[in-house]
Amino acid sequence: MRFVVSLIVLSFPILDVLATMRFARWTGIPTLAWLVASAVAGALLLRNERLTFRAKTLAALRGYQPLMRGLLDSCRRILAALLLILPGIVSDVIALLLLLLPINLGAPLATQPAGVSRSFGRDSLEGDFHRVD
């Protein structure tokens, strides 16, 4: 079983590059241009997600959004970026499918811990303050 899994894992990049060469011949797009463009897109996505992950984690720690949703969304984008960096059209299509998944829709994936309010900082009491001596 380990041999079959390792064979699949090792043969995927080779078959992916062969599929990319066939796709490039079919469309007329140079293979090297396709590989460089997808690697640059993956690197930019990875760079952007590094900054976004920090902001999402801080927002989750302050109670503005659930932690699990931010982690799943960041994990999905990082995996898509790594697949874009890998050479090949098949990995690029899988990465685009990962990016198109609507994970952020619907109910929150995790409940907030006790004592942390989701509306922290949004609600305020308005009024005038004056000191009575």
Image (tube, rainbow, N blue to C red):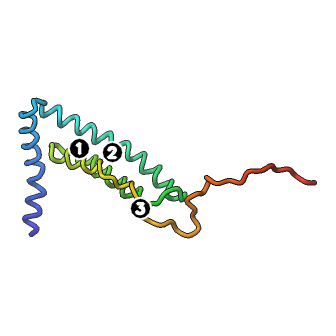
36 up-or-down from 102: above or below:
above
Q: Position of residue 100 (x, y in %)?
A: 29, 48
14 up-or-down from 61: above or below:
above
Q: Position of residue 72 (x, y in %)?
A: 36, 58
How far apart marks 3 and 2 lie (CA) works out to 19 Å
Residue placed at 31% from the left, 53% from the top? 76
Which is more N-terminal, label 2 or label 1? 2
Q: Which residue is mark 1?
A: 85
* Residue type, numbered disc 1: Ile
* Residue type, numbered disc 3: Met
Q: Secondary structure at mark 2?
A: helix
Nearer-the-camera pick, 113 or 40: 113
How far apart marks 1 and 2 lie (CA) works out to 10 Å
* Residue type, numbered disc 2: Leu
Question: Quadrant of residue 26 in the image?
Answer: top left
Which is more N-terminal, label 2 or label 3? 2
Residue placed at 57% from the left, 64% from the top? 116
Q: Secondary structure at mark 3?
A: helix
Quadrant where the image shows the N terminus: bottom left
Label 3 vs label 2, nearer the camera: 3
Nearer-the-camera pick, 52 or 108: 108
Q: Position of residue 118 (x, y in %)?
A: 55, 59
Quadrant where the image shows the C terminus: bottom right
Seen in the image, is 133 located left or right of residue 2? right
82 up-or-down from 26: above or below:
below
Q: Which residue is mark 3?
A: 68
Which is more N-terminal, label 1 or label 3? 3
Q: Are marks 1 and 2 in contact (CB under 8 Å)?
A: yes
Residue placed at 28% from the left, 38% from the top? 41
**Which label sits on residue 46?**
2
How far apart marks 3 and 1 lie (CA) works out to 26 Å
